[in-house]
Amino acid sequence: MFTGIIEATGKVVTKWQEGSNVHFAVESVISPELKVDQSVAHDGVCLTVVQTLGERHVVTAVEETLSRTNLNQLSEGDEINLERSMMLNGRLDGHLVQGHVDEVITCNKVKALDGSWLYTFSVGKKQRNLLVEKGSVCINGVSLTVVKADKKQFSVAIIPYTFENTSFKNIRKGSKVNIEYDIIGKYVLRMLGSR
């Protein structure tokens, strides 16, 4: 379980395939503190650390994960958001995030405002009922508040701190991003759908 509050960004140093799996070696300031078997969210995707190498750590994505996320699109040198799993005795500064990506969506527009940025994203037909204005959503591992939402798209506002300290500064029109909808909303929608 995560909070969507990014601890650090990392750089994909090496990416290689082994069978249907893809391994990523990531370099970051938190890598030396990680341990094998630890869960870490990489752009919102919960992955297990399988090896530590000083300033780098290695994670593996299986075929199921690759089919549901944008990890296959990562290249060596790309920046990714990192968050270790939450501690039960800490504050929940974001919202409850599982690290289980629901789908990959597209950025439709980035608008620079006077001191912030407004990002607009497309949304799938099945999931549009999971987005409510002022509700929570997780994009590339970042806990955000929905500004506006309609049947085809939604927007989020990004403050300068988030822009500078996450990979949001690299998202452009046409970028593919990971989205995890609010877990509470998913359960409520399922319960209502069974009636």
Image (tube, rainbow, N blue to C red):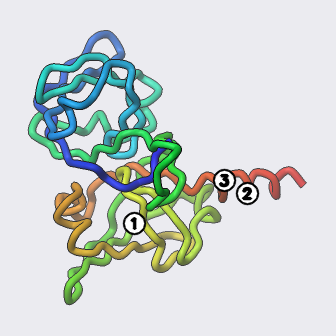
Q: Which residue is mark 1?
A: 121
Q: Nearer the viewer, residue 157 or 29?
A: 29
Number of marks: 3
Mark 3 neighbour class, 10 Å CA radius: few under 14, some 14 to 19, many 20 or more: some
Q: Position of residue 147 (x, y in %)?
A: 46, 78
Residues at discs 1 and 3 in contact (Cβ within 8 Å): no
Horizontally, is 118 left or right of 195 in the view? Answer: left
Q: Tell me the kind of residue under disc 1.
A: Phe
- Place of residue 155 in the rendered image (x, y in percent of width and height, measured from the top left): 41, 74
Give me the disc on residue 189: 2
Apparent side of residue 89 relative to residue 194 in the rendered image (left or right):
left
For marks 1 and 3, the one nearer the N-term is 1
Q: Residue furthest bottom?
A: 114
Kind of residue sitting beneath label 2: Leu
Q: Secondary structure at mark 3?
A: helix
Q: Mark 3 belongs to which amino acid?
A: Lys
Q: Quadrant of the C terminus?
A: bottom right
Q: CA distance from mark 2 to mark 1?
A: 21 Å
Residue 74 coordinates in the image, percent (x, y): 22, 38
Mark 2 and mark 3 in contact? Answer it, CB < 8 Å.
yes
Helix, strand or loop at disc 2? helix
**Residue 124 position within the rendered picture, expressed as x and y whole percent measured from the top left:** 53, 57
Say which of 160 and 148 sits in front.
160
Establish if 173 lies above or below 80. Answer: below
Considering only order in the chain, which callout, 1 or 2, is on the residue closer to the N terminus? 1
Q: Which residue is mark 3?
A: 186
Determine the residue positioned at 50% across, 47% down: 89
Residue positioned 37% across, 56% down in the render:
5
Other-residue count near label 1 (Cα within 10 Å), few / some / many at <14 / 14–19 / ≥20: many
Please tell me which residue is depicted at 23% across the width and 31% down the height of the picture. 33
- Outermost residue toward the front? 89
